[in-house]
Amino acid sequence: MAVSLISSTALFAQVPTVPSPDITTPKQFFGFQMGEDYCLANYQQLKDYWEKLQTESDRMKLVTIGKTEEGRPQLAAIVTSPANLRQLDRYKKIAHDLAHARGINKEDAKKLAAEGKAVIWIDGGLHASEVLCAQALIETVYRYLSATDEETLRVLNDVVILFVHANPDGQDLVADWYMREKQPTKRSLGNLPRLYQKYIGHDNNRDFYANTQAETKNLNRFMYREWFPQIMYNHHQTGPAGTVLFCPPFRDPFNYFCDPLVLNGIDSVGAAMMQRFLVEDKPGATSRSGAPYSTWFNGGLRTTSGFHNIIGILTETIGGPTPTQIPLVTAKQLPKGDYLAPIPPQTWHFRQSVEYSVTANKAILDYASRHREQLLYNVWFMGHNAIAKGERDSWTITPQRVEAAQKDKPAAGGGRREGGIGAGRGTGGVEFDRLFRKPENRDARGYILPADQPDFPTATKFVNTLLGTGVEVHRATADFTVENKKYPKGSYVVKCAQAYRAHVLDMFEPQDHPNDFAYPGGPPIKPYDSAGYTPAYQMAIKFDRVLVGFDGPFEAIPDLAVMPMPASVTNATAAVGFFLSPQLNDSFRAVNRLHKAGVEVRRLQQPTEAEGLKHPAGTFFIPNEPNALPILEKIAKELGTPFQGTKTAPDPDAVVLKPVRIGLWDRYGGSMPSGWTRWIFEQFEFPYTVIYAPELDQGKLRDKFDVILLVDGAYSGRGGMAAPGEPAEEPPPAANPNPEPPGNAADQYRGQKGAITGAKTVPQLKKFLDDGGTLLTIGTSTRLSRDLGVPVANHLAELDEDAREKPITSDKYYIPSSVLRVKVDTANPLTWGMTDHVDVMFSASPTFRLTSGADAKGLRRVAWFDTKTPLRSGWAWGQAYLEGGTAIVDAKVGKGRLVLFGPQVLFRGQSHGTFKLVFNGIVQHGVAEKTGN
């Protein structure tokens, strides 16, 4: 897509316009203009204002796209011309048909593009502490409802604008927190008492392929199921130091699954934005190398759109309601290709940031108006190409395949350097096919998820993530055969011949991140987020890649989500009890429901055979007590967990489980890993209590808790300072990790300040262990083992010239968030229900070496790296160093149990394949308590 770069400054001249007197201004409604110093509007005010504007303007339709996690209505304002509003359903259908592309030929696509209107998404407020974004959203909506200039009217005629609020709960929290102080100059955004999204805070921009949170589901449905925009613009803060903002183009690497027209579109829109900033004399915009943002990772609101043939735009802009300073960064005073107009240091006011944001919005909308037909046609073209690729043999060239080819390809032309001038003229076709067109390396034509896999309910959850992001999924209505393999009725089928093929591939296939270094032999360039994340791996889904065309008795799933296939209670007649497999994650949910209902649950501590059937250790057994059967039948139907009756009781191998009292660490201001864990516990119906450092310091923990969970970031061992250990696309504002609540903080936040320390907290945790408690630690919190005297050391260390251990340097070993495979001890109760190898989310995670005396002190390896190449998805430079290292340790401390989980076994609510490690650690305490083990 070419950009029409008009040289005349008249193109974007800010011609004064007289706004309509019938439209209430922000100043009239809020009492201040958007961007006024020391002022913020909250979401309730925004809602009231938009509702008022809808009654005043014939350019706006206000819709509720769903409820938030805290129950607020999540609003979107659809703004376009009155004539377009009357034809809104027609334009929505055109956008739908072009985006899906199926059954539409080139001529029809051109006709639809000529008839249709560009659909442009502009959001604000996703990261609520980035307060500019929602305020600019209010301002932009007002201007497009009130302005009467030629450009605005042209845009309204050509474009349907979706102004979408991304986080209502967060705006109310943050704005109310800031405005609570009556004296304006004392107002501050610092020390927010909790996460600005109920569970996951800043990680709400990491959830868009996983689709777990209410707001995520609302946004995904609105984008991929209802409106299908051609451009989406995701506002964020803050800009790089010494600049005003970052805008596209992005730096490499881009994800090779995405259509190149998406990247070309991003560059084109970015160029139009940059030109408008320059013409309006708004310097300070940087791009590419000016910030770390790329298009590699799929999980962000704007990055997921790229896998759906949508041009995803991100800006990061400075400014807040309290005036700030643009600092002097001397290197930023010299223009260069991706920073054309430096800005001198100066005092910066919030209103300036609002004006920059409005300019960016106008640039995108003007671009969409001028390129309306091309944008609509290109969406069809990308979808059409995706379908065509999915219907024929095709190959994706990845970094590893290029490296392999470079090693394999003989030197050409008598040693001429590959790729030199004149190289390869008239030759190379056969060689290319040999290197890059191997039949076994073809892209999948589709994926089959068998209904008879051990944990089909989790496979259903994976399918729901696909459905929630607009992917077409089918279900088998009868048994069928593909490539001589039989599959049962109810199996899921995901074919790649669909418009969102790029997203399908990215969900099933490994990400092959390139080796990205600042220079040869230099330090690695950190990815802006995960390098590898394949959800099918993280969730331990069993699936088959099908490399040929296939069909069968398949029906499309029309729903946004499907329920688990109902299970049943079998052999109930004369049964003394019922077995429940530990292979299903939802078996633990079933156990929690049974405990809540007062039904006794037992667990096999050894493999057992009953009536000719073998049941592994860890299997649950429910005695056939009065009223138990109807409860089991209800659970089986709702959760898809089958119960198998038996006439033979497994005594004495089945030990009674007692409900476990769980304490989950959190901190003032909120921990994202803890918030994710709260969400997981609630999904699986584990009762829990949130605990803070002051309560831990008070001691007597064993009187209140059986299990305490310290997530990543709860403890680092460095002076008691909490360390989040979380990668971030847009780093949240810096804050004291242990803030003192302000003097007027609500009573509910008392007792939350402080951090876990070696001096005060560790002795109480040691006492908890000595008294028989179970302490589960993840990530950085495993450093607690050092303070407890557990005989483990850092496996990833080497000796320096003085024979002292030091960590391996990043030029030799570097693994950002990626999926690795570990070997597990299936005899250990922590792994019951799991296979002998499992994929784990590894994010520069601790890796242990058991030192002398480990056996005598009751340490056991639960999971370890048994190969030099454990990488499954992502980037693992120097991965061979991991071989022999221990990933998970089970340690006896006093009468209790300490578990060290190095990898992120609960990663962002996505790693269902390793949830059992934590669930077993919790549930098995009930057995340990009963047996005294």
Image (cartoon, helix red, strand yellow):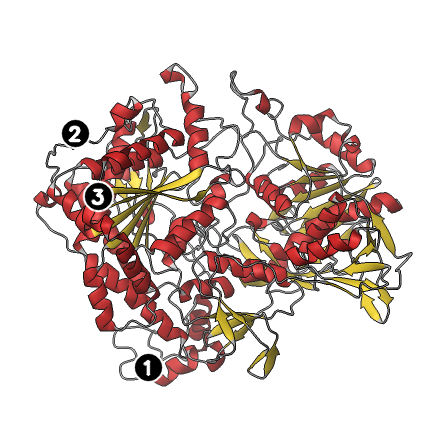
Q: Is residue 695 above or below residue 336?
A: above
Instruction: Tell which of 375 and 885 is nearer to you.
Output: 375
The CA span between labels 2 and 1 is 75 Å
Q: Is residue 98 above or below residue 585?
A: below
Q: Are marks 1 and 3 in contact (CB under 8 Å)?
A: no
The CA span between labels 1 and 3 is 54 Å
**Would you say residue 890 is visible in this rendering?**
yes
Give amino acid for label 3: Lys
Query: Residue 619: where, in percent of width, then height?
Result: 78, 59
Give amino acid for label 1: Gly
- Dot 1 corresponds to which residue? 413
The numbered disc on residue 362 is 3
Secondary structure beneath disc 3?
A: helix
The CA span between labels 3 and 2 is 22 Å
Quadrant occupied by the N terminus: bottom left
The residue positioned 65% from the left and 70% from the top of the image is 452
Secondary structure beneath disc 1?
A: loop
Instruction: Tell which of 843 and 879 is nearer to you.
Output: 843
- Dot 2 corresponds to which residue? 21
Disc 2 crowd, CA 10 A, few/some/many (<14, 14-19, 20+): few
Give amino acid for label 2: Pro
Query: Residue 846: where, in percent of width, then height?
Result: 63, 48
* Left or right of residue 38, residue 896 in this image: right
Q: Earlier in the sequence, mark 2 or mark 1?
A: 2
